[in-house]
Amino acid sequence: LVQLRTGHAPLNKHLARIKVADSPICPACEQREETVHHYILMCEAYQTQRDALRARTTARMLNLRALLNNPKHVPHLFRYVAETRRLENNFG
């Protein structure tokens, strides 16, 4: 959670900055830099999982700050992360 909050999550934007990845581009959609904002709120490759996240939080619009800081939303965010499997190699 702290890594997502600080932008130091193992997503390509951060990994490229610390020279662990060659490119900051999202490997799922190959359209934009893979930031926390892109991964959670924008990436088209995860739209199905995001729709499920929206339904679980009962929010009409997802808000990154609320997802990362509201204790009621955090379990749903963790489920989203698990369902996307994007961070699986890092967090199991």
Image (cartoon, grey):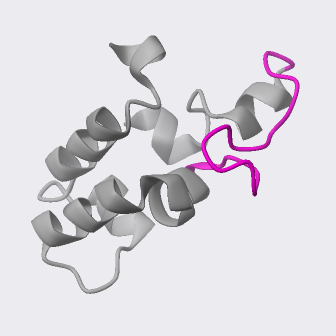
Quarter of image, res 91: top left
Image quarter of the N terminus:
top left
**In this view of the protein, which residue sits in the foreground, 16 or 6?**
16
Q: Position of residue 63 (x, y in %)?
A: 39, 73
Quarter of image, res 24: top right
- What's the residue at 27%, 49% (across, down)? 77
Q: Position of residue 8 (x, y in %)?
A: 61, 33
Q: Position of residue 64 (x, y in %)?
A: 43, 65
Per the rendered image, the range of residues in magenta is 19-36
52 displayed left or right of 35: left
36 displayed left or right of 53: right
25 displayed left or right of 68: right
55 w.r.t. 48: above or below: below
58 w.r.t. 36: above or below: below
- What's the residue at 46%, 55% (across, down)? 40
- What's the residue at 82%, 29% (across, down)? 16
Quarter of image, res 73: bottom left
- What's the residue at 75%, 56% (across, down)? 32
49 displayed left or right of 70: right
Q: Is residue 77 magenta?
A: no
Which secondary structure type mostly characterizes the magenta part of the structure? Answer: loop
Q: Position of residue 46 (x, y in %)?
A: 44, 53
